[in-house]
Protein backbone atom coordinates (compact mmCIF):
# COMPACT_ATOMS: atom_id res chain seq x y z
CA UNK A 1 0.00 0.00 0.00
CA UNK A 2 1.58 3.34 -1.04
CA UNK A 3 2.32 5.74 1.76
CA UNK A 4 1.16 9.35 1.90
CA UNK A 5 4.53 10.71 0.77
CA UNK A 6 4.40 8.73 -2.47
CA UNK A 7 0.84 9.91 -3.13
CA UNK A 8 1.80 13.55 -2.56
CA UNK A 9 4.80 13.22 -4.86
CA UNK A 10 2.69 11.70 -7.65
CA UNK A 11 0.08 14.45 -7.24
CA UNK A 12 2.79 17.11 -7.39
CA UNK A 13 4.33 15.51 -10.48
CA UNK A 14 0.93 15.42 -12.21
CA UNK A 15 0.45 19.11 -11.49
CA UNK A 16 3.93 19.89 -12.82
CA UNK A 17 3.18 17.93 -15.99
CA UNK A 18 0.34 20.27 -16.88
CA UNK A 19 1.49 22.76 -19.52
CA UNK A 20 1.64 26.32 -18.27
CA UNK A 21 -0.51 28.78 -20.18
CA UNK A 22 1.50 31.67 -21.61
CA UNK A 23 0.12 35.13 -22.30
CA UNK A 24 -0.65 34.45 -25.97
CA UNK A 25 -2.73 31.44 -24.94
CA UNK A 26 -4.63 33.60 -22.46
CA UNK A 27 -5.32 36.18 -25.14
CA UNK A 28 -6.61 33.48 -27.44
CA UNK A 29 -8.85 32.10 -24.69
CA UNK A 30 -10.14 35.58 -23.80
CA UNK A 31 -10.87 36.24 -27.46
CA UNK A 32 -12.93 33.04 -27.55
CA UNK A 33 -14.82 34.17 -24.45
CA UNK A 34 -15.55 37.51 -26.12
CA UNK A 35 -17.03 35.79 -29.16
CA UNK A 36 -19.18 33.45 -27.08
CA UNK A 37 -20.48 36.12 -24.71
CA UNK A 38 -20.67 39.01 -27.23
CA UNK A 39 -19.03 41.16 -24.58
CA UNK A 40 -17.38 43.47 -27.11
CA UNK A 41 -20.51 45.42 -28.05
CA UNK A 42 -21.67 45.62 -24.43
CA UNK A 43 -18.28 46.90 -23.24
CA UNK A 44 -18.22 49.53 -25.99
CA UNK A 45 -21.60 50.85 -24.89
CA UNK A 46 -20.52 50.91 -21.23
CA UNK A 47 -17.25 52.64 -22.10
CA UNK A 48 -18.77 55.47 -24.14
CA UNK A 49 -21.80 55.99 -21.93
CA UNK A 50 -19.87 56.12 -18.66
CA UNK A 51 -16.89 58.10 -19.98
CA UNK A 52 -19.46 60.61 -21.23
CA UNK A 53 -21.03 60.77 -17.76
CA UNK A 54 -17.66 61.12 -16.05
CA UNK A 55 -16.52 63.96 -18.31
CA UNK A 56 -19.75 65.93 -17.96
CA UNK A 57 -19.89 65.41 -14.20
CA UNK A 58 -16.42 66.88 -13.77
CA UNK A 59 -17.28 69.63 -16.24
CA UNK A 60 -20.02 70.68 -13.83
CA UNK A 61 -17.55 70.74 -10.94
CA UNK A 62 -15.07 72.85 -12.91
CA UNK A 63 -17.73 75.32 -14.14
CA UNK A 64 -19.11 75.72 -10.63
CA UNK A 65 -15.65 76.29 -9.16
CA UNK A 66 -14.70 78.75 -11.88
CA UNK A 67 -17.77 80.87 -11.08
CA UNK A 68 -17.29 80.87 -7.32
CA UNK A 69 -17.32 84.43 -5.89
CA UNK A 70 -13.99 83.82 -4.14
CA UNK A 71 -10.78 82.23 -5.33
CA UNK A 72 -10.89 78.44 -5.15
CA UNK A 73 -7.96 76.40 -3.90
CA UNK A 74 -6.90 73.91 -6.63
CA UNK A 75 -6.68 71.27 -3.93
CA UNK A 76 -10.44 71.64 -3.41
CA UNK A 77 -11.12 70.76 -7.05
CA UNK A 78 -8.61 67.91 -6.93
CA UNK A 79 -10.18 66.41 -3.81
CA UNK A 80 -13.70 66.85 -5.16
CA UNK A 81 -12.67 65.36 -8.50
CA UNK A 82 -10.82 62.41 -6.98
CA UNK A 83 -13.69 61.68 -4.60
CA UNK A 84 -16.16 61.82 -7.46
CA UNK A 85 -13.98 59.66 -9.70
CA UNK A 86 -13.49 57.10 -6.93
CA UNK A 87 -17.22 57.02 -6.19
CA UNK A 88 -18.08 56.58 -9.88
CA UNK A 89 -15.51 53.82 -10.21
CA UNK A 90 -16.77 51.81 -7.21
CA UNK A 91 -20.40 52.44 -8.12
CA UNK A 92 -19.80 51.41 -11.73
CA UNK A 93 -17.91 48.24 -10.91
CA UNK A 94 -20.28 47.02 -8.19
CA UNK A 95 -23.47 48.03 -9.98
CA UNK A 96 -22.42 46.58 -13.33
CA UNK A 97 -21.15 43.38 -11.69
CA UNK A 98 -24.43 42.70 -9.91
CA UNK A 99 -26.54 43.64 -12.92
CA UNK A 100 -24.44 41.78 -15.48
CA UNK A 101 -24.05 38.75 -13.21
CA UNK A 102 -27.82 38.45 -12.81
CA UNK A 103 -28.40 38.86 -16.54
CA UNK A 104 -25.72 36.31 -17.46
CA UNK A 105 -27.10 33.85 -14.92
CA UNK A 106 -30.55 34.23 -16.45
CA UNK A 107 -29.15 33.54 -19.92
CA UNK A 108 -27.27 30.45 -18.70
CA UNK A 109 -30.35 29.02 -17.01
CA UNK A 110 -32.36 29.61 -20.15
CA UNK A 111 -29.70 27.81 -22.19
CA UNK A 112 -29.62 24.94 -19.68
CA UNK A 113 -33.37 24.48 -20.01
CA UNK A 114 -33.06 24.43 -23.79
CA UNK A 115 -30.19 21.89 -23.76
CA UNK A 116 -31.57 19.85 -20.82
CA UNK A 117 -28.17 19.80 -19.11
CA UNK A 118 -26.07 21.74 -16.62
CA UNK A 119 -23.39 24.14 -17.89
CA UNK A 120 -21.43 24.55 -14.64
CA UNK A 121 -18.08 23.28 -15.97
CA UNK A 122 -18.34 24.45 -19.56
CA UNK A 123 -16.76 27.15 -21.67
CA UNK A 124 -20.10 28.98 -21.66
CA UNK A 125 -19.93 29.34 -17.89
CA UNK A 126 -16.33 30.60 -18.05
CA UNK A 127 -17.23 33.02 -20.84
CA UNK A 128 -20.10 34.33 -18.73
CA UNK A 129 -17.80 34.99 -15.77
CA UNK A 130 -15.25 36.68 -18.03
CA UNK A 131 -17.89 38.93 -19.58
CA UNK A 132 -19.24 39.93 -16.18
CA UNK A 133 -15.81 40.92 -14.86
CA UNK A 134 -14.77 42.75 -18.04
CA UNK A 135 -17.94 44.79 -18.33
CA UNK A 136 -17.75 45.67 -14.63
CA UNK A 137 -14.21 46.98 -14.97
CA UNK A 138 -15.07 48.98 -18.09
CA UNK A 139 -18.17 50.40 -16.45
CA UNK A 140 -16.20 51.50 -13.40
CA UNK A 141 -12.93 52.76 -14.83
CA UNK A 142 -14.21 54.61 -17.92
CA UNK A 143 -15.96 57.44 -16.02
CA UNK A 144 -13.12 57.68 -13.51
CA UNK A 145 -10.56 58.01 -16.31
CA UNK A 146 -12.58 60.70 -18.09
CA UNK A 147 -13.01 62.58 -14.82
CA UNK A 148 -9.28 62.49 -14.09
CA UNK A 149 -8.51 63.85 -17.55
CA UNK A 150 -10.85 66.79 -16.97
CA UNK A 151 -9.33 67.77 -13.61
CA UNK A 152 -5.72 67.03 -14.62
CA UNK A 153 -4.80 70.74 -15.12
CA UNK A 154 -5.44 71.40 -11.44
CA UNK A 155 -2.74 68.93 -10.48
CA UNK A 156 -0.36 71.17 -12.42
CA UNK A 157 -1.72 74.21 -10.60
CA UNK A 158 -1.19 72.52 -7.25
CA UNK A 159 2.39 71.67 -8.28
CA UNK A 160 3.05 75.27 -9.33
CA UNK A 161 3.32 74.68 -13.08
CA UNK A 162 0.09 76.42 -14.09
CA UNK A 163 -2.14 79.23 -12.85
CA UNK A 164 -5.82 78.84 -11.97
CA UNK A 165 -6.77 81.33 -14.68
CA UNK A 166 -5.14 79.04 -17.20
CA UNK A 167 -6.34 75.76 -15.67
CA UNK A 168 -10.06 76.48 -16.06
CA UNK A 169 -10.09 76.97 -19.86
CA UNK A 170 -7.62 74.08 -20.31
CA UNK A 171 -9.88 71.81 -18.27
CA UNK A 172 -12.95 72.79 -20.28
CA UNK A 173 -10.99 72.28 -23.51
CA UNK A 174 -9.94 68.80 -22.34
CA UNK A 175 -13.58 68.00 -21.62
CA UNK A 176 -14.56 68.98 -25.15
CA UNK A 177 -11.65 66.94 -26.51
CA UNK A 178 -12.81 63.86 -24.59
CA UNK A 179 -16.35 64.33 -25.90
CA UNK A 180 -15.06 64.81 -29.44
CA UNK A 181 -13.00 61.60 -29.26
CA UNK A 182 -16.02 59.69 -27.94
CA UNK A 183 -18.12 61.06 -30.78
CA UNK A 184 -15.52 60.08 -33.38
CA UNK A 185 -15.30 56.61 -31.83
CA UNK A 186 -19.08 56.19 -32.06
CA UNK A 187 -18.98 57.33 -35.67
CA UNK A 188 -16.28 54.81 -36.49
CA UNK A 189 -17.99 51.79 -34.95
CA UNK A 190 -21.33 52.75 -36.53
CA UNK A 191 -19.77 53.65 -39.89
CA UNK A 192 -21.38 57.10 -39.79
CA UNK A 193 -20.17 60.63 -40.43
CA UNK A 194 -17.25 61.60 -38.19
CA UNK A 195 -18.17 65.28 -38.33
CA UNK A 196 -21.80 64.56 -37.46
CA UNK A 197 -21.10 62.52 -34.35
CA UNK A 198 -18.22 64.69 -33.22
CA UNK A 199 -20.32 67.84 -33.56
CA UNK A 200 -23.18 66.26 -31.63
CA UNK A 201 -20.92 65.47 -28.70
CA UNK A 202 -19.45 68.98 -28.69
CA UNK A 203 -22.93 70.53 -28.73
CA UNK A 204 -23.96 68.42 -25.74
CA UNK A 205 -20.82 69.52 -23.88
CA UNK A 206 -21.38 73.20 -24.67
CA UNK A 207 -25.04 73.05 -23.69
CA UNK A 208 -24.08 71.34 -20.44
CA UNK A 209 -21.50 74.02 -19.69
CA UNK A 210 -24.05 76.74 -20.44
CA UNK A 211 -26.67 75.15 -18.18
CA UNK A 212 -24.15 74.77 -15.35
CA UNK A 213 -23.28 78.44 -15.69
CA UNK A 214 -26.96 79.47 -15.67
CA UNK A 215 -27.62 77.41 -12.53
CA UNK A 216 -24.56 78.90 -10.82
CA UNK A 217 -25.69 82.44 -11.67
CA UNK A 218 -29.22 81.67 -10.47
CA UNK A 219 -27.77 80.56 -7.14
CA UNK A 220 -25.88 83.80 -6.71
CA UNK A 221 -22.59 83.38 -8.55
CA UNK A 222 -21.36 86.55 -10.29
CA UNK A 223 -21.92 86.64 -14.03
CA UNK A 224 -18.53 86.84 -15.71
Image: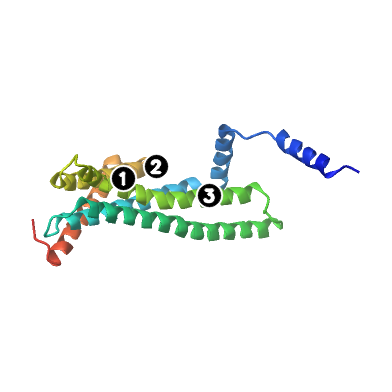
Residue drawn at 63 percent across, 56 percent down: 111
| Relative side of 156 to 185, left or right | left
Left or right of residue 169, residue 86 in this image? right
Q: Nearer the viewer, mark 2 or mark 3?
A: 3
Q: Residues within 10 Å of mark 3 (few under 14, many from 20)?
A: many
Of all residues, the one furthest to the bottom in this rendering is 219
Residue at the (55%, 39%) spot, across then down: 31
Q: Position of residue 187 (x, y in %)?
A: 34, 43
The quarter of the picture where the N terminus appears is: top right
In the image, which is nearer the foreground, mark 3 or mark 1? 3
One can see residue 102 in this view: yes
Position of residue 119 measured from the top left corner of the image (x, y, whole percent): 67, 53
Secondary structure at numbered mark 1 = helix
- Give the CA separation, mark 3 to mark 1: 25 Å
Residue lying at 68% horizontally and 50% vertically, measured from the top left: 121
Image coordinates of residue 158 in percent, x first then y, are: 22, 46
Q: Nearer the viewer, residue 73 or 209?
A: 73
Q: Earlier in the sequence, mark 1 or mark 2?
A: 1
Query: What label sits on residue 183 in the rendered view?
Result: 1
Helix, strand or loop at disc 2?
helix
Residue under numbered circle 3: 131
Residues at marks 1 and 2 touching, judged by CB atoms closer than 8 Å: no
- Say which residue appears at 46% left-offset and 47% top-offset: 41
Q: Point out residue 202 in the picture as x, y percentages from the top left corner.
A: 24, 48
Q: Residue furthest right?
A: 1
Numbered badge on residue 189: 2
- Disc 3 is placed on an element classified as helix
Q: In the picture shown, does residue 38 fall above or below 64?
A: above
- Earlier along the polypeptide chain: callout 3 or callout 1? 3
Taking depth in this image into account, of 92 and 87 the one nearest to the observer is: 87
Amino acid sequence: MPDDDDTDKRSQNNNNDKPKEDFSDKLERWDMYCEISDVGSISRRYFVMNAFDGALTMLGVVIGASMAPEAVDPLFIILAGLSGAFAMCISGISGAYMTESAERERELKSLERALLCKLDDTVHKEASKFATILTSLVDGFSPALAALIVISPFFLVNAGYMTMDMAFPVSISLTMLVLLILGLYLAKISDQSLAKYGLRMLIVGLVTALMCAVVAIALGAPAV
